[in-house]
Amino acid sequence: MFNEKAQKMKLDDIRELQEERLLKQVRYAYENVPMYKKRFKEEGIKPSDIKKLEDVSKVPFTVKDDLRDHYPYGILAVPKEKVVRFHASSGTTGTPTVVAYNRKDMDVWGDLMARCYDAAGAKPEYIVQNAYGYGLFTGGLGFHQGAEVLGCSVLPTSTGNTKKQVTMLNDFKTDVLACTPSYAIYLAEAAEKHGYDPIEDFDLKVGMFGAEPWSEEARDSIEESYDMKAQDVYGMSELYGPGVAIECSEQKGLHIWSDHFLVETIDPNTGEVLPEGEKGELVFTMLTREAMPLLRYRTKDVGSVTYEECECGRKHPRIESIDGRSDDMLIVGGVNVFPSQVEDALLETEGIAEHYQIIVDRDVLDRLFVRAEVDRDYYESDEYDEEKLKEEASENLKAVLNINARLKLLQPGSLPRTVGKAKRVIDQREEHDRIEEL
Ligand SMILES: [Zn+2]
């Protein structure tokens, strides 16, 4: 059920509810998940030590490896028979992580996603074209269920078959497009190739984009090509899936549905809780999930959280910006580099398109290479000046990154396009290390 009222809760009421739920959830996890009982004992704490909201800092962290180590059923707090849905990561980097939902969890997830659609500007009478992948990945079914809970009509197109996606956007006059931001950019290109004008022929009003980090420049590009609002959605499969946080119409950060999630920011190196507003790793405690409660789950996403009032009237705190995953962060010659910074610098340069690749390798010292496509209109215009563009983009990169990157400009359309998350970083340093060892 769509809990519209919960969106407008006052902050004091949210905090009060969080405290009540936290105390209950800590005891619930301790009593029903052996991993938590063991860990609490090791740390010498009991659920009764958690008396108020701030005491959450005494609770041990949970990390992704805990899910892998307990594959597939080890963190279940309910009997297997009570589970109504499983999702799992692809497992491309090792044992998959499994998440489980009972009936009540599914209802909560549906409500969280319905709130996201609503806050992003979708209406019950809208048609939602859902181009997220259906399957073990939480994106497809998460976006699907939330749209139905709000009352929208769903076109479950899933990923791929770009020509059909474009045709349906035109024929059905879809109102909401849900997919990764890189696919939205690709779809606009593809639409034109198939003879459609995304503004004249389509009737898109809102885009719900998540599952990968994207920049303000990418947003501008999407909003301009379709003449619609492009809204950022935040979530991850460990925390239900999409639906943890959403941008409202103000587009000034993502509201976290904090009656169900308690958020903290921590120093990723020491684990220390940081003061409000400071940038750090985002940590979430799931306050209500029954099938698989997660306490203080370390997301590896780096960002900051504000409790300042938003003009939309929602008092739920906002993630101000996500710099990227601490996992994605590259350390190049001792300097921290987030792929999102590279994107910002590139797209700040007029004449560069949204398609780029970052390559790091090592030749005694680390080297950073950036390959970026030139914008098609600019490339085909008489004003195109490769040297000038390269110089300008290199300066922007240097200003943002504080290190030199070797930039190569590519013809429009040279880099591979993707229907899911774009593979933008290639780190070849490990291979070199291995060669040297031989
Ligand atoms: Zn707002």
Image: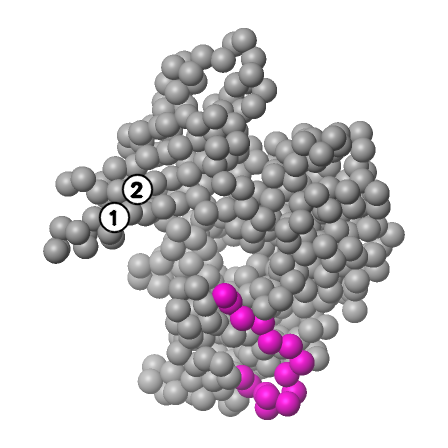
Quadrant where the C terminus is found in the figure? bottom left
- Residue type for callout 2: Val
User: What SS does tag 2 mark?
Assistant: strand
Residue farthest along the right direction in this orientation? 125
- Residue type for callout 1: Arg
Residue 429, which numbered label?
Answer: 1
Q: CB of mark 2 within 8 Å of CB of mark 1?
A: yes
Which segment is the magenta one?
A: 76-90
Quadrant where the N terminus is found in the figure? bottom right
Give the class, few, some or many, for how many residues have Cα within 10 Å of label 1's Cα (few <14, many ≥20). some
Q: Position of residue 321 (x, y in %)?
A: 52, 45
- 354 versus 94 height, above or below: above
Q: In the depicted view, which residue is nearer to us: 33 or 49?
A: 33
Name the side, left or right, on which 158 lies relative to 335: right
> Cβ of disc 1 within 8 Å of ligand 1?
no
Q: Position of residue 221 (x, y in %)?
A: 61, 32
Where residue 140 sits, quadrant-wise, is bottom right
Q: Which residue is mark 2?
A: 360
Give the class, few, some or many, for how many residues have Cα within 10 Å of label 2's Cα (few <14, many ≥20). some
Q: Residue at x 66, y 36 (%)?
A: 190
Q: Residue at x 53, y 38 (%)?
A: 215
